[in-house]
Amino acid sequence: MTDATQACEVETDPFIELGDEGQSLSMQTDGEESPGADVADVVCVLGELEIPDSVLTRISSTRALDGRQTATWSDYSASWGYHPDNGLDIVIELSAP
């Protein structure tokens, strides 16, 4: 995940944060009432993590009414939620071996 943030040049973005010594990544996009990371930067990081198209489609079609969603791929698990006021909130973690 560290490599993904470096490749997308977002290491200093306060809305894209590595945690757990590089084992997790939290990203928050901007909403109508709150600031956040640029969507293109979040998509770049997800691309570097080789997110499947199916999961990316699920993320982009999530509505506020859908609640928190989850997905797994390769060595990653993700959970996310969306609200127009707050934007997209996504947490990615390395899956347990």
Image (cartoon, rainbow, N blue to C red):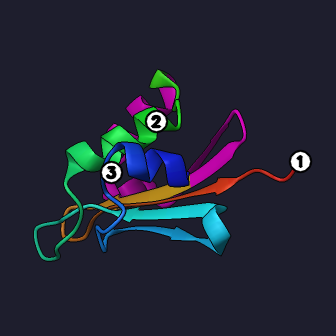
Give the left or right position of residue 45, taking residue 71 as reference: left
Compared with residue 83, is residue 45 higher up or lower down, i.e. above or below?
Answer: above
Q: What stretch is highlighted in magenta?
A: 54-78
Q: Which amino acid does label 1 sit on?
A: Pro
Q: Do the residues labelled 1 and 2 touch (CB within 8 Å)?
A: no
Where does the image place residue 47, in percent across and percent down from the top left?
Answer: 42, 33
Q: Residue at x 17, y 76 (%)?
A: 34
Q: Distance between the residues labelled 3 and 2?
A: 25 Å
Q: Distance between the residues labelled 1 and 2?
A: 21 Å
Q: Which amino acid does label 2 sit on?
A: Glu
* Count of numbered badges drawn on the protein: 3
Where does the image place residue 59, in percent across and percent down from the top left?
Answer: 41, 42
Say which mark, if any, is on residue 97: 1
| Secondary structure state at the residue bearing disc 3 | loop
| Secondary structure state at the residue bearing disc 1 | loop
Other residues around mark 3 within 10 Å, as few (<14) / some (14–19) / many (≥20): some
Say which mark, if any, is on residue 63: 3
- Residue 65: in sight, yes or no? yes
Depth check, mark 1 against mark 3: the one in front is 1
Please say whether residue 73 is one of the residues in the magenta stretch: yes
| Secondary structure state at the residue bearing disc 2 | helix
Say which mark, if any, is on residue 48: 2
Compared with residue 16, is residue 4 higher up or lower down, i.e. above or below?
Answer: above
